[in-house]
Image (tube, rainbow, N blue to C red):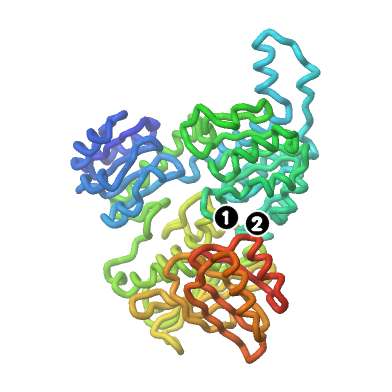
Amino acid sequence: MKKVLVAESLSEKGLDILREYTQVDVKVGLEPEELLAVIGDYEALLVRSQTQVTAGVIEAGHKLQVIGRAGVGVDNIDIEAATKRGIVVVNAPTGNTISAAEHTIALIFSLARHIPNAHASLKSGVWKRSEFMGSEIKDKTLGIIGLGNIGSEVAKRAHGLEMQVIAYDPFISIDRARNLQVELVSLEKLLKESDFISLHVPLTAQTKVMIGAKELAMVKPTARIINTARGGQIDEKALAKAVKERRLAGAAVDVFVKEPVTESILFESDGIIVTPHLGASTTEAQTFASVDVARQVIDVFKGQPARYAVNAPFISAESLPVLAPFIKVAATLGRLVSQLAEGQMRSVKIKYEGDISNYDTTALKAIVLGGLLEQISEERVNLVNANLVACQRGITVAEQKVPTCENYANLITVEATSDTGTTTVAATVMRAETHIVRINNYWIDIVPTGGYFLFSDHRERPGLIGAVGKITGDADINISYMHLSRLKPRGQALMILALDEPVNEEQRQQILALPDVQTAKLVKL
């Protein structure tokens, strides 16, 4: 019988499921050195958020087959070390959906009716009805940033409260939003028109400090902001200043840049409600997460794919020699499409040409979708849930296989169609490196070795490249190399600059202001 070490308190319902198939040892509160000493006896390790599953722990766990996180985030687990050892890491990304949505609604009511301050005032022996004049939320506009699992549930509840709901999420189809009775708008419009603004996106490079001083300057002085997603998405100092200067009516914050936290600039204002990361703190959510992770551990032990595997999806030993080089290709294509595409995503078509078309490409499809959605999805996309995650967002996914390839031995092409058009990118493997070889109608050849790239559509003319170079030069941004592809002399062209440092928004706007430049998009690969 396989042995499972449970290092943090989990619901007994999940543990009972495990006990039917495994030996379960519950050892809560182990010091790091104690965990290192015992982990070698176990095939599975279950944790929540406090236990640090470091590379050292993983190395010492020479029997480990699976690590389970009974919750959403996996920041406390060294995913790379686990993947190198072939250890599956699973989590429970949907277990807290309802709890987080309900906590958001609770904070909206608390802000609108000044409940925490009124409670504290009366408890102190003071009766002040007039100072806590509130406002109804009926007919108010709720702006939701991120219409994934939790955002969608918040929208449903807001409709029940007769609120008007708008949302910003480029990776939700218009049809899906329409089914949720939500109007999709730009982030700027959402900030300007909302009475309540609620964040429901993961913390990524794109969402880090997505609400700063510039964005807060756009909101109405009567607006209120709620963040139950992740700390770091709102500039805490800018938020506190906006509330203090009455440029914002109030805020409610459940998550912080550093946790646990007992001192913060957000604690200084009576206009800001704070809670200690309670989004998932319900009995039901903890039970759901425990049961979900327990079932996935058993699936792994039985040799079956786990529903929410965080690390690389499974590829059979027979297919691995052929498909392994294309794992990075697939991830790169997904990330590139997500940054180049505009409008509301509708469908994704993945085309495999050459020898790889003769193999099961399910894992590559999952990796493409994972790269496409990783910046905006609350859950990791994997072999099992790829179609489900896309379906939940109203995105149609199709695959096409062609046994021959005209220009390369193998080629993967991804076409993403939105309400504004289609973005096409293609890549292959040459000399053991990923090569991006097509962007829309342009055939190119760039190696995404990491770092930043500026993609610019323009009409080719003398002096344009020099003008762009002057802008980057004046900003002390080094161009490591440049690639230009054109449809015809002095016609439409695509310029790609590899940058050592990113251009900021002001510099990007300067490039866009140049005559004959149509687009200027900063991409990180």
Residue 465 position, x and y percent, is 61, 79
Q: Position of residue 347 (x, y in %)?
A: 59, 67
Read off the residue under disc 2: 176
From this viewpoint, is residue 436 visible? yes
Q: Residue visible at 20% across and 48% down?
A: 62
Q: Quadrant of the N terminus?
A: top left
Q: Residue 329 vs residue 239: left or right? A: left
Left or right of residue 496: residue 292: left
Q: Nearer the viewer, residue 372 or 465?
A: 465
Q: Secondary structure at mark 2?
A: helix
> Against 293, is 85 above or below?
below
Q: Quadrant of residue 141?
A: top right
Secondary structure at badge 1 equals: helix
Residue at 54% from the left image edge and 43% from the top image edge: 232
Asked if the residues shown at circle 1 and circle 2 are in contact, with their CB atoms under 8 angstroms apart, the answer is yes
Q: Eyeballing the image, is 443 above or below 331? A: below
